[in-house]
Image (cartoon, rainbow, N blue to C red):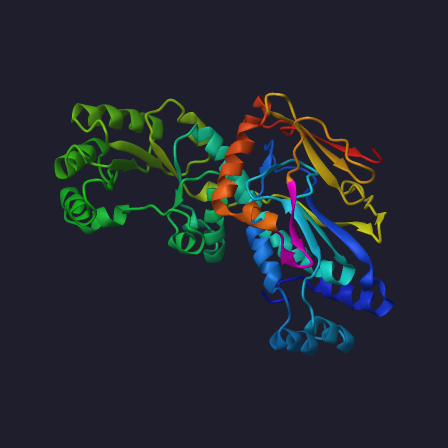
Amino acid sequence: MSGLSTDRYELTMLRAALADGTARRDCVFEVFARRLPEGRRFGMVAGQSRVVAALAGFGFDDDDLSFLDRNDVVDRDTLTWLAGYRFDGDVDGYADGEVHVPGSPLLSVRAPFGVAVLLETLVLSVLNHDCAVAGAAARMVLAAEGRPLIEMGSRRTHEAAAVDAARAAHVAGFASTSNLAAGARYGVPTAGTSAHAFTLLHDDERSAFAAQVAALGPGTTLLVDTYDIGQGIRTAVEVAGRDLGAVRIDSGDLAVHARFARRLLDDLGADRTRVVVSGDLDEHGIARLSGAPVDALGVGTSVVTGSGAPTAGLVYKLVQVDGRAVAKRSSGKATPGGAHRVVRRHRASGVATEEVLWTTGAVEEQEGDTSPSVPLLRSGEPTPQCADAVDLAASRRRSADRLGRLPWEGLSLAPGDPAFGTTYRGPA
């Protein structure tokens, strides 16, 4: 990835630090959220796989260096230094699918200042996006109560972001995506059959359904709300038979329509035909469908955009220099100094109760403690633990396990305190 995937001030800081010798100081930067998005009680980590991949290729080619030179961003000595840039530091991080609360050090970068400072924009742009999507998706997974969710938000976000949003939602528990690029790149299962345009293309609804069934078989999903839902369901069953895979409803009062559809399908003998709903759903809309005869749900805008996936609010802050803790004291933006080691405490039942962050001394471990942070890179190379931490299937299993360990109050969709607290400890 181009080294220009950064903000100018990171390079001007580098220029000054190289000039006065501080660029070589051993530093630790940590990524964390000071607070969760409004109304959230936990966040979910996604994007570590992309961070690891991006760091492997992060550097400055001749075109990058020429641009910096022409625009007088840095001097000749800095250009020479950048020409040989390669990230060779150490990175620890929470694995994809892990939950986090305010203060959780999702990523820790240890490297000389000059090496580490250039990563701020790159790391935050990846993690703020993917963690925002995963956090929103996780709430929807909880609200769905085991019913499969389809990510359908590609048309509501940037074309490149859509692919990574699909992966982040899948990490959090979504079953599939409409985005074929996410299927090709990441192996996310894909789903989708037709839109209203296909029905409108044909002279009547029956012709449209017949064409779709002829192409895809009776197990397909027919969109039945283009004109009249009741007539659409009757026509769908007449065309596809009682083995019709599913009907989809994309408008109106979804709970009312789902109950009507279920009764009508059963009356027509299509008792195995599933009911799929979509249309401006978010976690609250999904929760309102609790108890409704809905077999699967499609979610678009709210899982990929600010309406449902506000920025995760992550920051990249210097916390240690040459082994000495440093801390920002600005009003409203104070940060705890020191490189943190983390354990997560649990009740005997396995429910998470607290994260404890140590800066010095030995960590006092207790029965049931786990560590959400694992080594990802050492001297710039992936560790043995890295593969599991970023593997998609492992991340999905992890997210399901971590959601199952949240305390009851942490599962609420209503605003409130974080699911569990964070305690900072000095010497043990």
* Residue in the image at 39% along x and 35% along y: 148
Q: In the depicted view, which residue is nearer to us: 369 or 45?
A: 369
Residue 414 visible from this viewpoint: no
Quarter of image, res 118? bottom right
* 21 versus 65 height, above or below: above
List the single residue furthest toward the front.
384
Residue beneath the point at 64% across and 22% down = 347
Locate residue 104, reporting x and y percent: 68, 39
Q: Considering only vertical position in the picture, is 371 above or below 5? A: above
Identify the residue at image location x=59%, y=28%. Answer: 415
**Viewer-proximal residue, 316 or 202?**
316
Given residues 337 and 350, the one toward you in this image is: 350
Q: Quadrant location of residue 351?
A: top right
Q: Position of residue 368 (x, y in %)?
A: 65, 27
Quarter in which the N terminus is drawn: bottom right
Q: How many marks?
A: 0
Image coordinates for residue 205, horizontal then vertical, percent = 17, 43
Asked if residue 399 lies left or right of residue 230, the reply is right
Q: Is the stretch drawn in magenta largely helix, strand or loop?
A: strand
The stretch in magenta equals 373-383
Is residue 149 or residue 186 the one in the foreground? Answer: 186
Find out whether residue 378 is within the magenta segment: yes
Regarding residue 266, the answer to whether it shows in the image is: yes
Residue 222: x and y, percent?
24, 40
Q: Is residue 348 magenta?
A: no
Q: Is residue 302 left or right of residue 293?
A: right
Residue visible at 18% across and 40% down in the picture: 218
Quarter placement of the C terminus: top right
Displayed quadrant of residue 106: top right
- Going by the image, does 399 lie left or right of 427? left
Left or right, 185 with reference to 329 = left
